[in-house]
């Protein structure tokens, strides 16, 4: 079990949950978070464990800083990224900078210091599926990304594979489906609709609302990541998913039901350009080879718990809400 772990992007949604889980479940592990605290990062997401970790504010593209930190750790778990598709359609540059140059910078450093690397990625690298297609993504699926976000994630995956093959970097990769749970930024679909409903605003569905996402609770994702780090095959990719396919319309209806509102009490807004139709993950390899299984299998109760978290933590999300809605209003999506 690695003792000193450097977690990039640990002040973001999935990364902060990963830090909490690591501190709780793996006592003795020394955790350092490297995070640039962009608009998406929030040091307060780490306050429950602040005295048990080291926090370094800095950029993964800062080669000097990265080299110093990587040299002092056994394992790098790389969550840091620009992560929101809608932002990538307005300004792709930070996506190229962080997702490609940042990942390259980390890889060069783990190569030099011969450290273990785990790369966090997304199912979006495989493009999308038709609603009626009898197929899901698996480790053999062809890369075919649609957006600036997913193309830069695809590029970062390629860099990791090349560094593993050409330079013998000991790396593993995971490509996960859509996460939900606590500490997710209010720009993302589920927190946006929950906080709208808490504010008495109708949920906003892009286009016809029939696009399908494969939802997984963030704690299940992170448990799978540790399983892959501990037992995964070097140079290998594992897909992570929990058989959670649902249309956006169904998710909105579920939330309206939780809030006791009529299930048609939402607005259709302008669709996302190039909007991927459906994602679906076949996680058989992870289940059979590494014995992982999700624990949050009832999506509606996971949603209910997430609603409760946002209800109880308004001081966490409130500061970002107005500016986020202004961005959506400027794109005709409010
Ligand atoms: P997020 O946007 O909530 O968090 C990203 C974090 O990275 C933030 O704390 C931000 O400050 C930090 N960061 C950004 N640029 C940085 C830089 N240059 N240097 C250092 N830190 C930087 O993202 P998330 O939803 O938690 O996603 C985390 C990872 O998981 C990403 O790699 C994403 O592609 C991947 N992923 C996300 C999902 C999902 O549903 N959210 C699904 C599959 C994979
Ligand atoms: O207000 C909205 N209304 C709406 O209908 C928003 C914000 C989104 N949507 C739709 C778009 C998608 O079909 O909901 C779905 C989910 O949207 P996002 O939360 O933006 O997620 P998505 O684009 O699917 O990407 C997410 O999952 C894969 C993460 O943001 C990525 O980081 C991850 O790689």
Image (cartoon, rainbow, N blue to C red):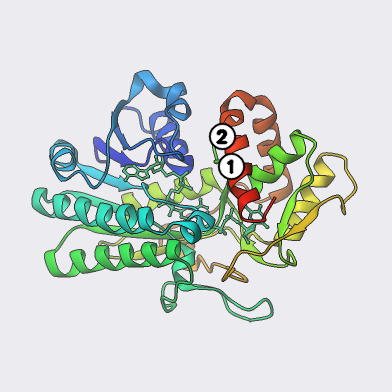
Q: Mark 2 points at which residue?
A: 320
What's the mark number on residue 332? Answer: none
Residue at 42% across, 28% down: 43
Q: In this view, does 270 lie to the left or right of 71?
A: right
Which residue corresponds to the image point at 67% horizontal and 76% vertical from the top-left?
A: 131
* Residue denoted by label 1: 324
Report whether 249 appears left or right of 125: right
Callout 1–callout 2 Cβ contact below 8 Å: yes
Question: Which residue appears farthest toward the right when viewing the image?
Answer: 262
Provide the secondary structure element on which disc 1 rests.
Answer: helix
Q: Position of residue 188 (x, y in %)?
A: 59, 48
Of the pair 107 and 92, the residue shown nearer to us: 92
Which secondary structure, mark 2? helix
Counting from the top left corner in percent of width and height, residue 88 is at 46, 58
**Residue 125 place in picture, x, y as percent:** 44, 68
Q: Is residue 31 visible?
A: no
Q: Is mark 1 within 8 Å of ligand 2?
A: no
């Amino acid at each position: 079990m690695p003792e000193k772990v450097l977690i990039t992007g640990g002040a973001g949604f999935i990364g902060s949950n990963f830090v909490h889980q690591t501190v709780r479940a793996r006592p003795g592990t020394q955790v350092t978070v490297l995070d640039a605290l962009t608009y998406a990062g929030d040091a307060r997401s780490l306050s429950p464990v602040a005295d048990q970790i080291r926090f370094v504010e800095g950029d993964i593209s800062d080669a000097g800083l990265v080299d110093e930190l990587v040299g002092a750790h056994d394992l790098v778990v790389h969550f840091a990224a620009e992560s929101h598709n809608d932002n990538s359609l307005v300004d792709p540059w930070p996506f190229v900078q962080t997702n490609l140059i940042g990942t390259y910078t980390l890889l060069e450093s783990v190569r030099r210091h011969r450290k273990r690397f785990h790369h966090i990625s997304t199912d979006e690298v495989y493009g999308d599926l038709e609603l009626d297609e009898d197929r899901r993504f698996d480790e053999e699926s062809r890369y075919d990304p649609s957006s600036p976000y997913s193309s830069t994630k695809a590029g970062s995956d390629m860099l990791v594979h090349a560094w593993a093959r050409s330079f013998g970097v000991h790396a593993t990769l995971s490509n996960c489906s859509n996460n939900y749970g606590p500490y997710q930024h209010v720009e993302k679909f589920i927190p946006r609709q929950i906080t709208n409903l808490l504010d008495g605003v109708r949920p906003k569905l892009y286009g016809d609302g029939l696009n399908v996402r494969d939802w997984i609770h963030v704690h299940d994702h992170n448990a799978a990541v540790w399983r892959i780090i501990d037992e995964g095959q070097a140079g290998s990719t594992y897909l992570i998913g929990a058989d959670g396919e649902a249309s956006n319309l169904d998710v909105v209806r579920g939330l309206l039901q939780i809030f006791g509102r009529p299930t048609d009490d939402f607005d259709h807004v302008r669709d996302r350009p190039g909007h991927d139709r459906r994602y679906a993950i076949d996680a058989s390899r992870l289940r059979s080879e590494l014995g992982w299984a999700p624990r949050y299998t009832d999506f509606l109760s996971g949603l209910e718990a997430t609603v409760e978290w946002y209800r109880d933590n308004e001081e966490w999300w409130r500061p970002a809400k107005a500016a986020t809605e202004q961005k959506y209003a400027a794109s005709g999506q409010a």
